[in-house]
Amino acid sequence: NFQNVGFIGLGNMGFRMANNLIRAGFNLAVHDINHGVMKMFSDMGIPAKDSPLDVAESSDVVITMLPSSSHVLDVYTGPNGLLHGGSIVRPLLFIDSSTIDPQTSRKLSAAVSQCALKQEKDDWKKPVMLDAPVSGGVIAAEAGWWFPGSLSVCQTPISLNGKKHNLLWRSRNWFCKLLQAAKICNNLAMAVSMLGVSEALALGQSLGIDASTLTQVFNSSSARCWSSDSYNPVPGVMEGVPASRNYAGGFASKLMSKDLNLAAASAKDVGIECPLTSQAGEIYESVCKDGHESEDFSCVFRHHYSGQDE
Ligand code: NAD
């Protein structure tokens, strides 16, 4: 029974995901280090807890949606963390939907699986941690598309025990490794396509074609992609995207920079040359250094290409 859900990390994604769970009828308890967002939840009557441990005490499943590996480690293993003192107080299921490096995921999965929770009489159950990175950005989070996929994945291991559980455990680790790898590769392709669309639109503007017209050309020809038709980086071309609200919200440039670093590290691990990964990483690093780290990653159009910083 996963009716009592703990949610930790209520930023651009987590805020929307948690609200979807509330609308779907789950009992939520939440935690974030941002007091403003905690107040928004407590004003809605949702228990806003002081620590991850407090969340764990009232939850059957805990979902984390945090910026990077170090934050996830902190929430799991830090003081008053989910694995306080190397033990688990209540949840049988932990779902991490943050995009982090696969080594950290595996390390935490192993730590969770070493704990055992006493149920009624002599019935012991092993808690499980699932790696469930999400895609689709704030639009998908708002629409709730992430939710069915994650939950159907997590039904399986929890219902098994003994030998079957161990078999599944191995395939789950393999599955999770692929999921994080797929997520990192997806974001690498997304960064490069965003840079390509921004570069081409900036060049088009300099050649005298306005961005809306050129976007229409792209979207009805071979340059069409998510960055041109769903998440256009030029202010005024599309409504409802970060570019139309001064690049606020969405997927922060510092998070894209983190994912490009993860992609570069993975490429190094397997000895593959990925020159566009390095170049995209440098561009996002410089956007962040120039003070735009919290703006949506489509802000490369403004800060790297269109010269509006000068
Ligand atoms: P965000 O920075 O908007 O939100 C992160 C939240 O975590 C913030 O509210 C922050 O206060 C909170 N937090 C940080 N450290 C904490 C701690 N120790 N304890 C409790 N709360 C803490 O990030 P986001 O855009 O929501 O992304 C979250 C994760 O999802 C990242 O790993 C990102 O790469 C991934 N992701 C984001 C998007 C997107 O479009 N934004 C899409 C897919 C995946």
Image (cartoon, rainbow, N blue to C red):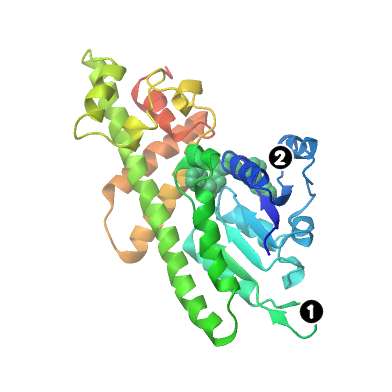
**Secondary structure category for the residue under label 2:** loop
Across and down, in percent, residue 186 comes to 37, 50
| Earlier-in-chain disc, 1 versus 2 | 2
- Measure how far apart labels 1 and 2 are at the Cα level: 37 Å
Hey, which quadrant is residue 83 in on the image?
bottom right
Q: Label 2: how many residues lie within 10 Å, few (<14), some (14-19) or many (20+)?
A: few
Side of 6 relative to 17 (left or right) = right
Mark 1 vs mark 2: in front: 1
Residue on which the image places disc 1: 120
Q: Residue at x 47, y 65 (%)?
A: 176
In the image, 232 versus 33, the foreground residue is 232
What amino acid is found at the position of numbered circle 2 in the picture?
Asn
Work out whether 18 lies above or below 152: above
Distance from mark 2 CB to nearest ligand 1 atom below 8 Å: yes
Across and down, in percent, residue 284 comes to 42, 38
In the image, 10 versus 305, the foreground residue is 10
Work out whether 308 lies above or below 3: above
Determine if residue 100 is in view.
no
User: Which quadrant contains ligand 1?
Assistant: top right
Across and down, in percent, residue 248 comes to 53, 28
Label number found at residue 34: 2
Hey, which quadrant is residue 299 in on the image?
top left
Residue lying farthest front?
25
